[in-house]
Image (tube, helix red, strand yellow):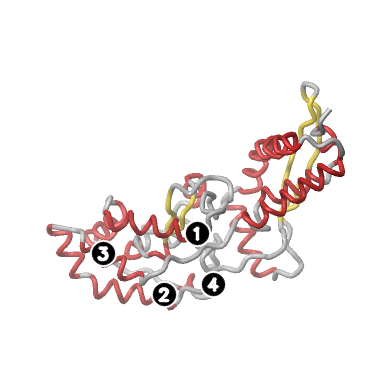
């Protein structure tokens, strides 16, 4: 889970490039819509704040207009692919390979934060395209507002995130085939410095995307990764190994950020002496 950087450039210019690649009657119709689309872009950009974005109203479109607007995203236009690449490459090297919604999967898809079914005019707006994994995209679907008007998911371009960890792993150990293995669950805990009102959005985000259950399912894979890194150190004492793993953790945290679920799990495992003893060189 990490903040996203907005792509440089004026969103309406990317729209113009995509529409400019359209030919035939659809190209003519979209070109005639440009002035109105620019006005709608201005509406979104003026409201693009944590407090304002959920107030963006939908606009009525004819079915033909809606189909044309959605085609801007659903086609394989060169200008659209270039925009997607720019969004991906704008993100920091260490985290661009992880979905910001979950921090688990690779972001091989793009989510429309404001659903394109409701807001077809924003189907290629650079602010509205969030690189994400297929699991998160599927779980989110067209959801973005609760019945009371509050947002369901974090917008990683504009929403504030805690600076302190908010995941607490609970690690229980069992022995299988002579090897010590963890059974991990996670709790979401609000940092004292983060307001309850802001944290409500994070809680909603976690619930909608089933993150605690998904982290639990992935925990064993990350345990094995840390176990392999510890074994490769070939340390002879717990003190030496723990120091090495703490340094490793610090480097990973600089890359992934303090909110990444892997960091929370690693931090817990490093403090478990029997785990470290299992990783010592005989």
Residue located beneath label 2 in the image: 45
Tell me how far mark 3 sits from mark 4, CA to CA.
29 Å
Query: Residue 224 appears at what percent x and percent y?
Result: 69, 35
Residue located beneath label 4 in the image: 50
Residue located beneath label 1 in the image: 91
Q: Secondary structure at mark 3?
A: helix
Q: Residue at x 41, y 68 (%)?
A: 8
Tell me how far mark 1 sits from mark 3, CA to CA.
22 Å
Label 1–label 3 contact, CB within 8 A: no
Q: Residue at x 61, y 58 (%)?
A: 204
Q: Secondary structure at mark 4?
A: loop
Is 187 left or right of 119, judged from the image as shown? right
Q: Earlier in the sequence, mark 3 or mark 4?
A: 3
Label 2–label 4 contact, CB within 8 A: no
Tell me how far mark 3 sits from mark 2, CA to CA.
19 Å
Query: Residue 183 appears at what percent x and percent y?
Result: 75, 36
Q: Earlier in the sequence, mark 3 or mark 2?
A: 3
Query: Residue 221 appears at what percent x and percent y?
Result: 65, 36
Q: Residue at x 79, y 34 (%)?
A: 279
Q: Residues within 10 Å of mark 3 (few under 14, many from 20)?
A: some
């Amino acid at each position: 889970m990490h903040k996203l950087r907005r792509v440089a450039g004026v969103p309406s210019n990317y729209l113009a490039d995509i529409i400019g690649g359209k030919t035939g009657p659809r190209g003519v119709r979209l070109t005639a819509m440009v002035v109105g689309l620019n006005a709608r872009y201005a509406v979104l950009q003026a409201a693009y704040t944590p407090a304002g974005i959920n107030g963006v109203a939908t606009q009525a479109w004819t079915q033909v207009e809606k189909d044309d607007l959605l085609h801007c995203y659903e086609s394989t236009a060169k200008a659209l692919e270039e925009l997607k690449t720019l969004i991906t490459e704008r993100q920091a090297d260490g985290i661009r390979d992880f979905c910001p919604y979950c921090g688990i999967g690779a972001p091989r898809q793009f989510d429309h934060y404001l659903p394109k079914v409701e807001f077809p005019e924003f189907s290629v707006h650079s602010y509205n395209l969030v690189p994400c994994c297929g699991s998160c995209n599927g779980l989110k679907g067209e959801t973005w507002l609760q019945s009371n008007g509050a947002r369901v998911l974090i917008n990683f371009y504009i929403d504030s995130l805690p600076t302190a960890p908010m995941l607490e792993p609970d690690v229980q150990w069992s022995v299988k085939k002579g090897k010590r293995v963890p059974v991990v669950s996670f709790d979401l805990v609000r940092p004292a410095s983060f307001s309850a009102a802001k944290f409500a959005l994070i809680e909603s985000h976690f619930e909608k995307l089933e993150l605690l259950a998904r982290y639990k399912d992935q925990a064993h894979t990350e345990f094995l990764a840390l176990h392999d890194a510890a074994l490769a150190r070939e340390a002879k004492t717990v003190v030496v190994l723990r120091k090495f793993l703490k340094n490793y953790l610090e480097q990973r945290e600089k890359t992934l950020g303090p909110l990444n679920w892997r960091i929370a799990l690693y931090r817990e495992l490093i403090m478990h002496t029997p785990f470290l003893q299992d990783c010592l060189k005989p």
